[in-house]
Structure formats: structure tokens, C-alpha cells
Amino acid sequence: MDLQKQTGARVAAAELRASDADRDRITDILRDALAEGRLTAEEHAERVEGVLAAKTVGELDVFIRDLPAAHKPSAYAPPSSVPHRPTPGAIPIDADERLLAVFSSSVRKGRWRAGRRIHAYAVFGSVEIDLSEALFEHRQVMIRAVSLFGSVEIRVPENVSLRGSGGGVLGSFEVDNLDSGEPDAPVVYVDGFAVLGSVEAKPRRGKVIADLLGRVTDHVARKVDGSLRKHLDR
């Protein structure tokens, strides 16, 4: 019974529509295979052309099926089990930061510390919240976005998880669900509504959380520092 379920899950995954990130991942594997001499230049060019034309995850798998990287667990990360709502009690009732645009614009971007709750209101105006270079000090971040004849635009790094719940009245509320491959990555929740306006949240391609990379760097630095200290103490 478990085997049947696993087989069904693999079939369902193969039928999923391929994303740009999926194609980039397969292209990287093919590039490494070319560099290792596993593929000729002609084979590489032919497969890359096929990757760009592929529509589903299953079609992408065909191009790396005979390569060692395809049989590693990291070839395709399993979907995250990130809940669609924050953990009860994890998000405060009061906002840590508010952005208001009334017949104007309000922008929050660059290097800044993201609080656990952010409120954004656009009334005949526009609000831009760019988290692509922000410092995340909390595992869960909630953004309450309300647009009345205006627009709220939210951008997040590629290596966080993104969830949304809301709606539009003669307007649009669009949140791209995003699953991070990092086990400790933050989750950004977006809720609210748009009336004759728009709320949009999506990843900013090519941007990743600096702190996650920093944690790895700090860990390595501490290990090196510790090794040096042991060596000097001898």
C-alpha cells in the first residue's frame, strides 16, 4: 500500500508544470555534465534546447535520467510542508511597522530588519515592500496588505517560503506560493484584500537571504578559528 502511494506521488510530481527554477536546475546539471566530459557539446546543446521547450517536471527528468546527479536526493527537492497560516501566537496583533500611501507612494527596500507583522495600506497610491535584501530575525513574517484604488507590491528572496490568503473586489490579489529548500528559512505570509486595486507578492529572481548565507559563513569561520586556536595552544 505504501509502495502504491509512493508510486502515485512520483507520477503526480512528474505531471506538474515545470517552473523557470526547475529548468535552471536541470540546465545547471547539464552544464556540470558537459564540464565533466559526460556529454559532448552537441549532446549538451540538444538537451538544453529540449529543457527550454519542456512543459512538465517529467519531461525535464528525461534529459538527466542517465546522469549521476539525477539520482541524488537534491535533484528535485520534495514539496515543503509549510502551513498556509502562521503558528498561533507567533505573530503579534500590533504591527511592528506600517506603510501608508494616500495619493502618494511608500517604499521599503534595501537593507532593513523585517518585523513579525507589517501593515501596508494603499489608497489611491502605491506601496512597495522589497524583502530581497532584508534581515529576517523571525521565522514567520506576516504582511497585511490592503489596496483601495491603489497597489501593493511585495517582493521576497528566492530562498524563503511564501503563502497568501485574500481576495479582490473588482481588483486582483495575487500571491505566488513559494517553497524554500532551506529547512530553517523564514515564511512570509501575505493576507488582505484589494478593492479596485491590486496586491501582488512574488519572489525576486536571483535574490537570496543574506543571513542564511551568513549563518553558514559564520559557522565555518568559527570552526576555522577554533582549529587555529587549538593549533596555537599546542
Image: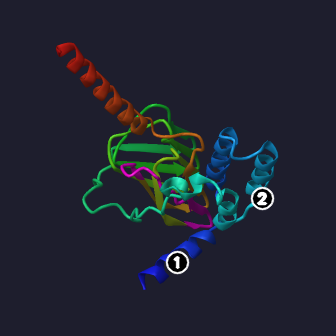
Residue in the picture at 39% in, 65% down: 83
How many callouts does the rendering have? 2
Q: Are marks 2 and 1 in contact (CB under 8 Å)?
A: no
Badge 1 marks a residue whose secondary structure is helix
Q: CA distance from mark 2 to mark 1?
A: 26 Å
Q: Nearer the viewer, mark 2 or mark 1?
A: 1
Q: Tell me where residue 206 sits by quadrant.
A: top right
Residue 114 lies, in percent from the top left, at 38, 41
Say the numbered circle drawn on residue 7: 1
* Towards the viewer: 188 or 46: 46
Q: Is residue 169 magenta?
A: yes
Which of disc 1 and disc 2 is earlier in sequence?
Answer: 1
Extent of the magenta region = 168-187
Q: Which mark is residue 53?
A: 2
**Quadrant position of the C terminus in the picture:** top left
**Does 118 sit left or right of 79 as displayed?**
left
Q: Looking at the picture, how far across and down is residue 39, in whole percent?
A: 73, 47
Q: Is residue 28 magenta?
A: no
Q: Amino acid at mark 2?
A: Ala
Provide the secondary structure element on which disc 2 rests. helix
Quadrant of the frame with the N terminus: bottom left
* Residue reaching furthest to the left: 233
